[in-house]
Image (cartoon, rainbow, N blue to C red):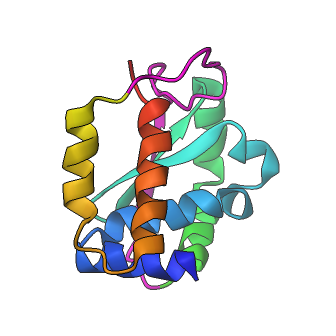
């Protein structure tokens, strides 16, 4: 239920690429398998190309060999979204959710940023959905870049 509400919000705000990326991220292990999902992640779309972050260049080279399988897996997970190719890039070391980093303390949120986000989601009619989206944003921001 909650996922359908989020999908409506993303569609209304024309965030379909981000929604597709979110959906792909949640199903990533089914696309590339358990082992590869630990060293890769879907990063972003640029036009019809999915960019995938890879932990190191050795794995990047290996993934080139299975690129057609990855593309087919992506198309299975996102059948209504046009993905023409996949490309690989090294995993940026400054990403906050890099599995190799640990976070000792959450970041403080500025009151201005909270008010800005609340203003952004005020048009969501369902209180539960709006609050869940706010909580998700808040958790993301607390673990965000410093």
Left or right for 83, reference 65: left
Quadrant for the C terminus in the image: top left
Tell me what residue is drawn at x 57 percent, y 25 percent.
57
In the foreground, 18 or 85: 18
Residue 81 within the magenta-colored segment of the rendering? yes
Left or right for 119, reference 63: left
The relative height of residue 10 versus residue 105 in the rendered view (above or below) is below
Which quadrant of the structure image shows residue 29? bottom right
Bounds of the magenta segment: 80-108
Badge count: 0
Residue, far top: 104
Residue 131 within the magenta-colored segment of the rendering? no
The relative height of residue 102 versus residue 116 in the rendered view (above or below) is above
Residue, far right: 34
The relative height of residue 102 versus residue 21 in the rendered view (above or below) is above
Measuring from the top left, give residue 5's x and y in whole percent. 45, 80
Residue 135 seen from this side: yes
Tell me what residue is drawn at x 58 percent, y 35 percent.
60
Measuring from the top left, give residue 126's x and y in whole percent. 39, 79
Which quadrant of the structure image shows residue 21? bottom left
Left or right for 26, reference 144: right
Quadrant for the N terminus in the image: bottom right
């Amino acid at each position: 239920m909650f996922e359908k509400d989020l999908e409506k919000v993303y569609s209304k705000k024309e965030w379909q690429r981000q929604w597709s990326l979110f959906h792909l991220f949640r199903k990533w292990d089914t696309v590339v398998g358990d082992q590869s999902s630990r060293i890769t992640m879907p990063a972003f779309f640029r036009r019809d190309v999915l960019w995938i972050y890879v932990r190191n260049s050795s794995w990047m080279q290996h993934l080139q060999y299975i690129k057609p399988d990855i593309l087919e897996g992506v198309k299975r997970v996102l059948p209504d979204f046009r993905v023409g190719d996949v490309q690989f890039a090294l995993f940026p070391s400054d990403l906050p959710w890099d599995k190799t980093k640990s976070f000792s303390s959450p970041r403080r949120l500025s009151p201005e940023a909270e008010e800005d986000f609340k203003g952004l989601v005020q048009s969501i009619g369902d209180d539960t959905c709006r609050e869940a989206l706010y909580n998700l944003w808040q958790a993301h921001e607390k673990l965000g870049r410093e």
